[in-house]
Image (cartoon, rainbow, N blue to C red):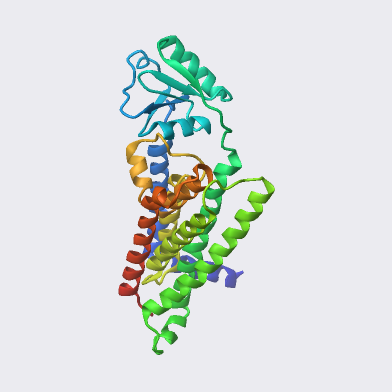
């Protein structure tokens, strides 16, 4: 019993003396709870979504209606596509409205619009709703990639440093960028390969059809994986404490879990939430993959997602190589 108590006391001292780890264990839950409260504590969430085509303003006859969210779409084709796939309940401009007759929510939205704006002419748009698994699949695969990229690389490098593996490598001609590049390429190959297998199996089981070019999915997934791995390497470039690295990796992974569109769409969310989400690599990867799978988007349509992923990778690797330490 004395030996057991001595070991418990020793471990408690080790943890309490690691101020960085102790700080993360206290601060991180508070930050997470505050963030969740700010982002998701909304008792007045809209019940219906109406798309506004082009520069169409919210009609005065509809402004008094509550629990309706209005989303602007730059082109009519984009708005009609959203209505066809049940991603928005109804779309209007100054003269027309478009609704999918197979949409239950669209039916109610149409009754509201007809009652308030009887002069609008109607047009039906046919299209199947995006299935839950079809929408969810890219996010789940992205989440799995995120954890594998951040913890599978960052945590391992920190352990190498603590156990002296990196110190032994220091006496070799190996340079920091070579070591980091080897870690990234090794993990990236494994992550992309497993993601392709999982996607193929789920697509086969649930009959998911990729509307766009599958090669774009592979390119985007590779860039997304590289961006998240490079962040893990940046965290591990100098950190010696496994507890501290775990806290920092949590600080990176949880915002992506909540704001990168894994479980729900951020379309129509508050501008500041969308701005914060656009800083995260997982957001760009998920949005681009869904655009290719569901909308059939081409390279130019997802280019604004690809270049941030490439930029995050290059900047993070450069910083990790510059500040890397072997011991």
Q: Quadrant of the image for the N terminus?
A: bottom right
Is the residue 320 above or below the residue 250 in the image? below
Q: Identify the residue at image location x=43%, y=45%.
A: 259
Q: Identify the residue at image location x=54%, y=19%.
A: 107
Q: Identify the residue at image location x=35%, y=56%.
A: 308
Residue 252 in which image quadrant: bottom left
In-front residue for pair 163/232: 232
Q: Position of residue 150 (x, y in %)?
A: 47, 62
Is the residue 228 above or below the residue 286 in the image? below
Is the residue 73 above or below the residue 316 in the image? above
Q: Quadrant of the image for the C terminus?
A: bottom left
Q: Identify the residue at image location x=54%, y=54%.
A: 214
In-front residue for pair 241/105: 105
How many marks are shown on the rendered structure?
0
In-front residue for pair 8/185: 185
Is the residue 106 above or below the residue 137 in the image? above
Is any atom of residue 22 visible in this view?
yes
Q: Position of residue 67 (x, y in %)?
A: 43, 21
Q: Position of residue 258 (x, y in %)?
A: 46, 45
Q: Where is residue 268 in the image (x, y as percent from the top left)?
A: 40, 34
Is any atom of residue 280 visible in this view?
no
């Amino acid at each position: 019993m004395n030996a057991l108590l001595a070991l418990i006391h020793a471990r408690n001292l080790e943890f309490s003396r690691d101020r960085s780890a102790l700080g993360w264990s206290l601060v991180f839950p508070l930050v997470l709870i505050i963030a969740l409260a700010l982002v998701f504590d909304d008792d007045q969430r809209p019940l219906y979504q109406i798309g506004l085509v082009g520069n169409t303003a919210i009609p005065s006859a509809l402004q008094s209606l509550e629990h309706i969210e209005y989303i602007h779409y730059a082109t009519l084709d984009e708005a009609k596509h959203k209505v066809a796939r049940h991603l928005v309940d109804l779309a209007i401009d100054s003269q027309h409205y478009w609704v999918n007759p197979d949409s239950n929510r669209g039916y109610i939205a149409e009754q509201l619009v007809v009652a308030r704006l009887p002069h609008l002419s109607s047009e039906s748009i046919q299209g199947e709703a995006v299935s839950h698994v079809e929408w969810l699949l890219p996010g789940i695969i992205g989440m799995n990639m995120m954890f594998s990229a951040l913890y599978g690389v960052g945590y391992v490098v920190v352990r190498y440093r603590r156990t002296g593996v990196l110190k032994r490598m220091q006496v070799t001609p190996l340079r920091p960028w070579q070591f980091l590049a080897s870690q990234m390429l090794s993990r990236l190959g494994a992550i992309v390969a497993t993601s392709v297998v999982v996607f193929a199996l789920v697509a086969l089981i649930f009959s998911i059809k990729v509307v766009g070019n599958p090669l774009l999915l592979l390119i985007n997934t590779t860039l997304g994986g590289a961006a998240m791995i490079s962040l893990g390497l940046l965290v591990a470039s100098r950190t010696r404490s496994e507890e501290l690295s775990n806290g920092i990796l949590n600080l990176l992974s949880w915002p992506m879990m909540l704001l990168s569109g894994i479980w729900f769409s951020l379309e129509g969310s508050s501008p500041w939430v969308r701005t914060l989400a656009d800083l995260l690599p997982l957001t760009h990867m998920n949005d681009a993959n869904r655009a290719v799978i569901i909308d059939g988007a081409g390279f130019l349509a997802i280019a604004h997602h690809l270049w941030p992923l490439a930029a995050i990778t290059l900047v993070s690797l450069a910083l990790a190589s510059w500040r890397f330490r072997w011991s």
